[in-house]
C-alpha cells in the first residue's frame, strides 16, 4: 500500500512550528530591548508582555492538535532518511512536544512567579552581602527544581534538568570526567602559582571606550561576524541573542582600565552569534534553528575567545593594529609581553574573571555543590560554609564576603537550579576537541590565522557544526565530527603545551 | 432582582483585553526596532514575525467568547455611570469587537499582501518618477478600500474609512469645514506671497548633528517629555511609538543645513508622545490606553510644534540657549530675526516642508482627490493631471515631476486609501481650538512659557485631554473641553494675528 500523501500535514507542521519560533524570537527581542534601550519606566509592562507571549507560545507548543499531527506524520518520517531535514524536524518537534506536555501549566505559572521573586531578592542580597535573605528563596528553588525534574523522570534528580539544556547528557556521564579533570588541574594550578608571575599591568592603563569599541568592531568584522546580520550594543552584562538567522546580535560592556574585558567577552559572544549566523538557511523558523545544546554553544564561544583569540598566531596579525590604536599605552610593549599578559594565570575568587586554567575549577565547585543540594546531602544553610571550604581546597583562597563568594553568580538565584554550570566546563573541553580535529582536518587553519585570514576555520566550523543546528545532540555531534565521545585529552594537551611554554614549566 | 455579581466577568474581560494590548504593543516594538537598530538581514523574518503576531491579535480580538462576555456584561455596564472607567472599557471594547468581526480574515490576508506589494512598488516608482508603475496598485488599493468600507457601511464610501481613525466623524461633517477653510486661506496665502519675503538663511548654515541632538534633548526635557518613560533615536522618518504608558519613544532625523527640521519634528513627535505618557495609569493595558483619534493626536503634536514651539514666548526662553550652543552661526542673529525665519511662509510643492499657513492647502488637495477617487469621479489615470492642476490653482506652483507631486507621500501607496489626510488639517484646527480654551482657562500659561515653565500647559492638557485616552471621541472631547463643536475661528484668528504681524499685513 503506498503511503498517503503527507505533504499537506508537513506544511501544517511547519506553519505551526514557524509561529512558535516567531513568538520565541519576539520574546528574545523583548529581552534584548529591555537590556539595551528600554527606558526604566517600561519595565512593569515589559514583564507582562513577555509573560503573555510565553503563555501563547506554551499553548501552541502543547496544543494536542500539534501532538496528533506529529503522530500522523510517523509513517512519513519513517519513509525518509533519518538525517534528512524533514525527518529531523518531525523527530525534534515531537521530542519538544512530548517534553513540554509533561509540565503542567499551573507549575510553569508558579515557577515564573518564584523566579521573579528570587531574582529580586538576590539583586538586593548580593550587594548587601546578605545570604540569609536569599536562603528561603533558594530552598524553594530546590523544591521547584526537584518538582520540575519529577515531571520528566531520570536516573538522577539532576538528569532531566541537564537534559533541558543538553539533551542526552546525564550526571553519570559528566561526573567521572569532572573528577578526572579536577585531579589533573589541581597540580597544574599549583605549579603555575609557584612559578614567577606574569606582568599584566599593560592591560590596566587607560583605554578609552570609543577606541576600544572601534578596535573590537574591526576584529569582529575580520573574524567573520556578519554585521549585515548582526550588531553590537552596550549592556550591563554581555550576551548574544538571536531573532532570526538574519539577525543575531551581541552586546558588551567596556572597562576603561581593563583592556581584556570588552575585547575577549566580545569575541566570546561573537562565537555564540557566529554559530547562529552559520545555521543553514533551510532551518529558518523551525525548532532546528539554534545551537544544539548549552555545552556545544559554549564550545563555540570559548573556541573563538580562547583557542583562537588568546593564541599567539591571532596576535601576530592583530597586535600591530592594537598597538597602532593605542600607541601611547602599548608602544613599548612587545607582542610577546602582551601575549603573556592576556594569558596570565592567577587563582581568584570570581568565576567570570578567571583564566583558562583555573576557570573550570570554579565551575566544578558549583556543579558539585548544586548536585549535593538537589540530592539533599547539602542543606542551603550549610552552602556558604561548603563554598568557602571548597574554594580554600581548590583555589587556595577564601572569600571575605558572600558577595564575592556564594552570591556572585546569578544562576542559582533565578529560581531554577541545575543544568547550567556543567555546560561551561563541557564547553571548554568540547572546544579543544573540535579545534584539535579542525587542525588535523586542515593544517592550514593556524597558518591562515597568523595572516589574519579566518575563512578556513569558519568554513570548517560551518560545515561540521554551525549548519546543522539542533539536528544532532551534543554527543552525536562529537562522534560525527571528532570520531569519538567526549575526551579530556585535547583540552589538557592544549593547557599543558600553552602554559608550560608561558610559565617555562614541564606540565 | 439584584444584579448577578459580574466582577469575575469584568476581570476576565480585562485579562483578555490586556493580552490583546500586549500583543499590539509588541508589534509596535517590532516596527520600532526595524526602523532603529535592526540589521538589514533581519527584514524577512521580521515581516513574518509581525504577521504572526497580527494574526494572533486578530484571533483574540474576534474571539466569539469575547463577544459573548461583552454581551453578558451589558446589565453590569448599564448599572455604572456612563463615563466610569469600567463602563467606558466595556463600551469601547464592544465597539472594537463589533467593528473587527465585520471584516473577514480572508480579506485581511488579501489586504496585507497587497499592502506589502504596493509599498514596494512605490519605493521604486517614487525615485524613478514612474507613476505608471504604481497605477495598477493604486487601482487595486481603491477596490480594496471600497471593499473594506462595504463591510462597515456608511452614508459615504469614505465614512467607514474615516471612522477607523476618527470614530464619529464623516465626510459630510468635514467637507463644509474644509471648503470654508480653503476659501479663507487662499487670499491669505496670496497676500503673504506678495509681501516682502522673510530671510531664513540663518537656519541653513552648518549645524553639527550631535550639537543639534543635545540641544533638542534639553528642549524636550524642559517641555516635560519624560525620559524615564521614553527616549529619542534616529530613523529615516521621525515617528512616535508607544509600548506602554511607561515607555513612549520618539525618533528624529537630522539635517546639518536645516536647523528647523530635527528641532520642530522632534517637538512634534514629543507632542504625540506626551499625549500617550499622560494617559491615566488606570488605563494601562486596556483598549482605552491610547490617544482617542488620529485628528486629536495630531492636534497634540501640532500644538507643541507650532502654537508653542514657533511662538515668540517660547523663544524668549530658548533662544539665548540656542545662541549659546551655536555662537558662530547665530551670534549675530537677533531673537526677532530667528522668530521670523522659523515662521517663513512660502508656497511650495512638498507637504511635509510646508509652513503653518500653506500646510492645510496641501492636505485638502489630497483629501478632495482621494474622495473623488473613492467615489469614482476621478480615475487613477487622471490623478497626476488633477494633482498638478490643483497645485497650480491653490499654491501657484506645478510639480516638475511626479516624484515631487503625486508620488511624494507614502499614504496612498500603503494599499489602503482614505481616513488619514483629513486628520492633519483637523489636527491643526483642533490644536488652535484647544489652545485658545487653555489660555482662557488659565491666562498664566503664555506668561509661564516665556519663563521656560511649561507645567501649567502640561497640567491643563493632561487634565482635559491626555488622561482620558479613548474614553471620549473627537467630537465629545471638543464639546467637553471647549464647550462647542469644531470651529474654524481659533485657527484663523491665530494665523491672522501671527502672520499679520510677521508680514506687516492686515489679514
Image (cartoon, coloured by chain):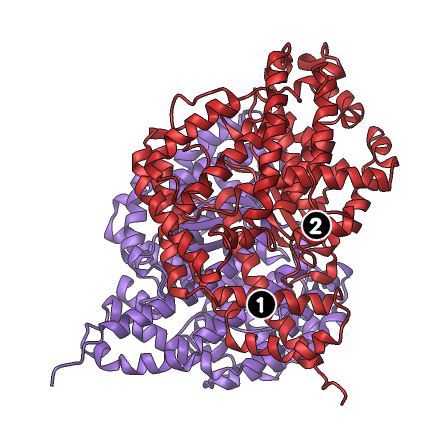
Chain colours: A red, B purple
Q: Which residue is mark 1?
A: A19
For disc 1, the neighbor class at 10 Å (few under 14, some 14 to 19, many from 20) is many
Q: Are marks 2 and 1 in contact (CB under 8 Å)?
A: no
Q: Nearer the viewer, residue B500 or B472?
A: B472
Q: Left of B96 or right of it: where is A230?
A: right
Q: Position of residue A324 (x, y in %)?
A: 74, 19
Q: Which residue is mark 2?
A: A277
Q: Position of residue B331 (x, y in %)?
A: 53, 25
Number of on-image labels:
2
**In the image, what residue occupies the spot 58% across and 82% down?**
B106
Is residue B56 among what the camera can see?
yes
Q: Nearer the viewer, residue B40 or A308?
A: A308
Looking at the rendered image, the quarter that the N terminus of chain B falls into is bottom left
For disc 2, the neighbor class at 10 Å (few under 14, some 14 to 19, many from 20) is many
**In the image, what residue occupies the spot 65% across and 25% down?**
A211
Earlier in the chain: of badge 2 and badge 1, it is 1
The quadrant holding residue A203 is top right
Looking at the rendered image, the quarter that the C terminus of chain B falls into is bottom left
The quadrant holding residue A489 is top right
Q: Position of residue B429 (x, y in %)?
A: 41, 61
> In the rendered image of this protein, does residue A186 appear above or below residue A366?
above
Q: Chain of mark 1?
A: A
Is residue B353 among what the camera can see?
no
Q: Nearer the viewer, residue B196 or B114?
A: B114
- Which element is circle 2 on? helix
Amino acid at each position: 500500500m503506498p503511503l498517503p500523501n503527507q505533504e499537506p500535514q508537513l506544511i501544517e507542521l511547519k506553519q505551526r512550528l514557524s509561529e512558535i519560533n516567531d513568538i520565541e524570537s519576539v520574546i528574545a527581542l523583548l529581552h534584548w530591548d529591555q537590556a539595551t534601550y528600554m527606558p526604566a519606566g517600561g519595565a512593569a509592562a515589559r514583564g507582562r508582555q513577555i509573560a503573555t507571549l510565553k503563555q501563547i507560545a506554551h499553548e501552541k507548543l502543547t496544543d494536542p492538535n500539534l501532538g496528533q499531527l506529529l503522530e500522523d506524520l510517523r509513517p512519513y518520517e519513517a519513509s525518509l532518511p533519518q538525517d534528512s531535514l524533514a525527518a529531523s524536524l518531525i523527530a525534534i518537534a515531537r521530542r519538544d512536544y512530548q517534553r513540554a506536555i509533561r509540565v503542567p501549566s499551573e507549575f510553569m505559572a508558579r515557577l515564573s512567579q518564584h523566579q521573579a521573586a528570587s531574582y529580586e531578592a538576590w539583586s538586593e542580597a548580593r550587594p548587601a552581602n546578605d545570604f540569609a535573605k536569599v536562603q528561603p528563596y533558594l530552598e524553594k528553588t530546590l523544591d521547584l527544581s526537584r518538582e520540575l525534574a519529577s515531571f520528566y523522570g531520570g536516573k538522577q534528580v539532576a538528569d532531566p534538568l541537564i537534559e533541558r539544556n543538553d539533551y542526552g547528557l546525564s550526571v553519570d556521564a559528566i561526573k567521572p570526567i569532572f573528577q578526572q579533570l579536577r585531579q589533573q588541574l589541581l597540580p597544574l594550578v599549583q605549579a603555575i602559582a609557584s612559578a614567577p608571575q606574569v606582568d599584566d599591568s599593560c592591560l590596566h592603563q587607560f583605554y578609552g571606550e570609543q577606541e576600544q569599541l572601534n578596535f573590537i568592531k574591526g576584529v569582529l568584522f575580520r573574524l567573520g561576524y556578519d554585521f549585515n546580520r548582526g550588531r553590537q550594543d552596550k549592556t550591563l552584562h554581555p550576551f548574544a541573542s538571536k531573532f532570526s538567522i538574519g539577525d543575531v546580535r551581541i552586546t558588551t560592556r567596556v572597562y576603561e582600565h581593563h583592556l581584556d574585558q570588552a575585547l575577549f567577552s566580545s569575541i566570546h559572544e561573537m562565537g555564540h552569534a557566529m554559530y547562529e549566523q552559520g545555521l543553514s538557511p533551510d532551518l529558518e523558523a523551525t525548532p532546528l534553528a539554534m545551537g544544539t545544546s548549552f555545552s556545544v554553544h559554549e564550545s563555540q564561544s570559548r573556541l573563538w575567545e580562547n583557542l583562537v583569540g588568546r593564541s599567539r598566531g591571532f596576535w601576530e596579525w592583530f597586535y600591530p593594529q592594537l598597538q597602532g590604536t593605542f600607541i601611547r599605552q602599548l608602544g613599548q610593549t612587545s607582542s610577546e609581553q602582551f601575549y603573556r599578559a592576556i594569558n596570565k594565570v592567577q587563582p581568584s575568587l570570581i568565576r567570570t574573571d578567571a583564566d583558562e586554567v583555573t576557570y573550570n575549577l570554579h565551575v566544578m565547585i558549583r556543579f558539585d555543590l548544586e548536585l549535593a543540594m538537589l540530592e539533599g546531602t547539602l542543606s542551603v544553610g550549610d552552602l556558604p560554609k561548603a563554598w568557602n571550604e571548597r574554594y580554600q581546597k581548590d583555589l587556595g583562597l577564601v572569600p571575605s564576603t558572600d558577595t564575592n563568594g556564594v552570591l556572585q553568580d546569578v544562576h542559582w538565584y533565578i529560581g531554577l537550579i541545575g543544568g547550567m554550570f556543567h555546560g561551561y566546563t563541557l564547553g571548554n573541553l568540547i572546544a579543544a576537541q573540535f579545534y584539535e580535529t579542525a587542525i588535523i582536518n586542515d593544517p592550514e587553519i593556524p597558518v591562515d590565522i597568523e595572516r589574519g585570514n579566518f575563512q578556513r576555520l569558519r568554513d570548517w566550523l560551518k560545515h561540521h557544526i554551525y549548519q546543522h543546528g539542533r539536528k544532532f545532540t551534543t554527543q552525536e555531534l562529537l562522534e560525527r565530527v571528532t570520531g569519538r565521545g567526549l575526551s579530556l585529552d585535547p583540552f589538557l594537551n592544549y593547557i599543558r603545551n600553552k602554559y608550560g611554554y608561558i610559565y617555562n614549566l614541564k606540565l
